[in-house]
Amino acid sequence: MLKINNVVKIFNKNTINQKIALNGIDLELEEGDFVTVIGGNGAGKSTLLNVIAGVFSPDEGKIILDGKDITNVPEHKRSADVARVFQDPMKGTAAEMNVEENVAIAKMRGKKRGLGWNVTKEDKKKFKELVSQLDLGLENYMSQKVSLLSGGQRQALTLLMATINKPKLLLLDEHTAALDPKTAEKVLEITSKVTQNQTTVMITHNMKDALRFGNKIIMMNEGKIVFSASGEEKKKLTVNALLEKFAIVGNQTDRVLLS
Amino acid sequence: MLLQLCAPLTAVFNVLPGSIADGFIWSILTIGVFISYKILNIADMSVEGTFALGGTVTAALLTIGVPVSVAMIVGAIGGFIAGVFTAILHTKLKIPAILSGILTMFILYSINIHVLGNKASLALLGRITLMRKLAEATSPMVANLIVGGIFALLTVGASYWFFGTKYGSSVRATGCNPEMARAQGINTDGRIILTLGISNALAALSGSLLAQSNNNVTANMGSGAIVIGLAGVVLGEAFVKEKWPFAFRLIGVLAGSVLYRIVIALALQLLNGFLTADDMKLISAVLIIAVLAAKRFSAKRPLKTKSNNLSENLNAENK
Ligand SMILES: Nc1ncnc2c1ncn2[C@@H]1O[C@H](COP(=O)(O)OP(=O)(O)O)[C@@H](O)[C@H]1O
Ligand SMILES: [Mg+2]
């Protein structure tokens, strides 16, 4: 359902700061696939998601979603099909708007926003119920500004907003990295709840999470996919096995970070 | 002795109706500035030009006998187009917002002089303005109060409605967090273009009303408009807490605009001899700085603890 064909992304092309962030990426996902992405800092993981989401267009290659070439479709037009949760909890919600207004905005993703009232009485009830499924007690703060919520609560809300109208593709970019371990665990729990049968790409810096989640795994280094596994092969993988792959790639410095 | 005490009171009483009427008329500009500065998070200098454009276009059209309603609508459309122009400079040519606004302001300064037939000012005495009939039946002051008041309330109401709709909410999201907005499928460039158009149309409408109330326009009547608009916004927000519902914030802006006029008029009256009309800009800037400074020193701590409390409450509930 997602086909990425020989994608190349070069930042600051033809300058002294030129950086080949993606160097010929090929990736194919089936409907319902959950891929975890690992790799050291600067490997190009975020750039890959940004190119899929349309934040940057690639210098070369094609991105095909559900048979449709979306390589040059602008970001805001893609978001009906491609939903995202960022690493920074501040990025996924509008801080100055309240919880239900945020949910209402997500509910309209991919639809035409007209001059109807943003949050109707029925919406209020519906959204409250949806938010209560997060099991965070957030349903009691529906008319509070999101800026008053903690990072974990905002990330959970962003997850809910990303999946409220089931997107074709969900992109998670280290979405628990900025949270304390306990909150991260809670958000991961919610992640597995909302990603049932949801085609998902999840970047993580945590090897255990990379193995625990998903049916596919890819490892990136210097803009390339250097290792991938799926199905049974992935199930058999261990953290140590992954660390060995890293060593072969020559990513010694990251060993400490990734253990 | 008694007389001396009474003097300031009489002063207050004398300036009050005129200041309120002025405040109403200027509040339309203030809401335009509120929309660009607070909702879109863009400091848009174009209002300096579009405020005057509303006045010059209305005056020029009234002079050639165009009905006042048409003259005002054309003025507002002129403001809209100028706002769209600024927004395109900013979103498509990636020129910083401040500079985009300054460029538009400069262009409009030349345009405004041309609109007035290459003159720096134009008198409207004897022309059929919106206030004229009412002014003849009552007094110019009452006419200004009523017409200004109606337009101010309509602007507040329309803004409240617009920003409560799905479309308007997507504009608020754009100003608040453009990355999130795009991730939610909102065309942020499009929202900025339309909304700067609206805010400058409001500035032009405000200028059109002021021209009619003064029975006079000058090509540079918009000079300082951004500061006056900001003063109203800042004064309004000094009393209305940001967490209050949106309607209160809009009414706060209206109140801030009126209050600003009263403060300025009083300062000029009471300090007559020390200050002249030329000092208005100085007073305005000092007023804004004082309110912002007061806000900074008083609001910082309580706000923080408040947010921590809510987060703590929520966390406690999860345990
Ligand atoms: N907007 C950008 N402009 C210039 N260079 C960038 C930009 N985004 C990422 N890069 C560079 O591209 C490389 C890959 O970055 P990124 O995809 O963020 O890595 P990862 O997410 O795997 O840590 C890095 O060297 C980074 O500095
Ligand atoms: Mg990254």
Image (tube, helix red, strand yellow):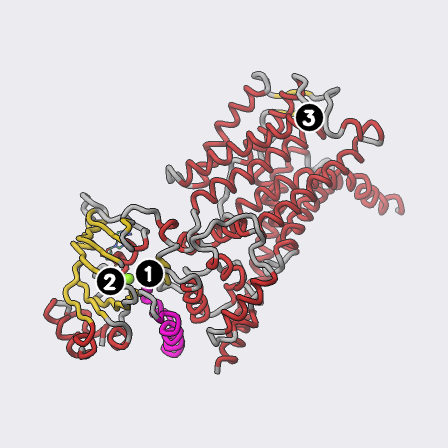
Chain under numbered label 2: A
* Disc 3 to disc 2, C-alpha distance: 64 Å
Q: Label 2 CB, ligand 1: below 8 Å?
A: no
Residue furthest left in the image:
A248
Q: Count neighbours of disc 1 (C-alpha within 10 A) and say few if under 14, some if 14 to 19, many if 20 or more.
A: many
Residue under label 3: B68
Q: Which mark is residue A29?
A: 2
Amino acid at dot 3 = Val
Residue A181 forms part of the magenta stretch: yes
Q: Position of residue B106 (x, y in %)?
A: 49, 29
**Residue that appears at 55% across and 32% down:** B79
Q: Are marks 1 and 2 on the same chain?
A: yes
Residue B128 forms part of the magenta stretch: no
User: Is there a contact, CB below 8 Å, between mark 3 and mark 1?
Assistant: no
Q: Which residues are magenta?
A: A171-196
Quarter of the picture holding the N terminus of chain A: bottom left
Q: Are marks 3 and 1 on the same chain?
A: no
Q: Position of residue A64 (x, y in %)?
A: 26, 53
Amino acid at dot 2 = Leu
* Disc 3 to disc 1, C-alpha distance: 55 Å
Residue under label 1: A169
